[in-house]
Image (tube, helix red, strand yellow):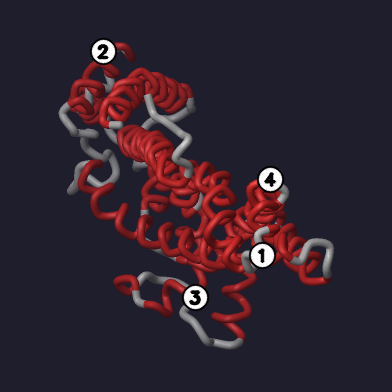
Amino acid sequence: MFGYIVKRLLGAIPTMLLIMIAVFALIHIAPGGPFDNKRPMPAEVRANLNATYHLDEPLLVQFGYYLSGVVQGDFGPSYKFKEFTVTELIGQAFPVSLKLGISALIIALLVGVPAGMVAALKRDSLLDLVVMSTSMTGMVIPTFVLAPIMVMVFGVHLKWLPVAGWNHGALPNMVMPVIALSLPYVAYVARMTRGSTLEVLRSNYIRTAQAKGLPMRLVLFRHALKPALLPVVSFLGPAIAGIVVGSVVIERIFGLPGLGRYFVDGAINRDYTLVMGVSIFYAALLLLMNIVVDVAYTFLDPRVKLK
């Protein structure tokens, strides 16, 4: 298994390089520059700033400077937040996004998996119809629609919860962002769990266990649960990265100091290094989560061998 992990990590290097090239090119193709939003400045000052940040060099040379810094773990200085490097900004913001994302993912699993299994056991019943209809609704309503509605109802009219702010991760401040972020994933997990459970329940070994007189509860948890969770585990790799990336909208709506805030601010202000750093960080997180999912497969299904 160790050799497989090393092989996957080495194989991720070309992928990360291609991602860096693509993001670097897209950022520089976009009109404007990092100092265009500032007040008019003398040409000499602008020239000095461009020289300081190597922006007067050819793009290939700029990319070489940036790549050499990334190899050393340095994402460069931020053009907007001059007191901090991009690495420091990511280090400050990522715990907020991580706490928000992991909380939403836990809710998605705790609610989605049981709901999907119950719907599979009660197939074609009213309960199954309710679960699947609710799941479909959760999948089609975007978070940028759901979040403002929650703010209006629970924050403005009922005044049960604060409408914005992080407050060091206090529970009242997390309730609405976590729920708004988790609902689409609850829906996905529930539908996937239902489909995989139905498929597993049709398997010969499940029918054999039932024919031997084992209680359905025992059949479900001892024989059907692990294989039924395989599609869900496959979904978790991109879901973990996606739920952190998806928190960009939620963080902006609820005023949370996470990565989403810096990513949006960097894009608006043409802060090249900040956008590059957050994009590379997200890409690395996605690749890492996919490796973790592959390893987790071996614990759920002994037939899976990593080579």
Q: Nearer the viewer, mark 4 or mark 2?
A: 4
Q: Nearer the viewer, residue 195 or 226?
A: 226
Percent position (x, y) of residue 4?
Answer: 32, 26
Left or right side of 88 for 97: right
Left or right side of 271 for 226: right
- Name the residue at 72% across, 54% down: 140
Residue 284, disc: none
Q: Residues within 10 Å of mark 3 (few under 14, many from 20)?
A: many
Residue 163, disc: 3
Up/down of 103 relative to 10, above or below: below
Percent position (x, y) of residue 243?
Answer: 48, 51
Name the amino acid, label 1: Gly
Which element is circle 2 on? helix
Q: Which residue is mark 4?
A: 204
Q: Residues within 10 Å of mark 2 (few under 14, many from 20)?
A: few
The quarter of the picture where the N terminus appears is top left
Percent position (x, y) of residue 271?
Answer: 35, 37
Q: Residues within 10 Å of mark 1 (few under 14, many from 20)?
A: few
Residue 61, disc: 2
Q: Which residue is mark 1?
A: 213
Name the amino acid, label 2: Val
Left or right side of 235 for 12: left
- Name the residue at 41% across, 40% down: 298
How far apart marks 3 and 4 lie (CA) works out to 52 Å
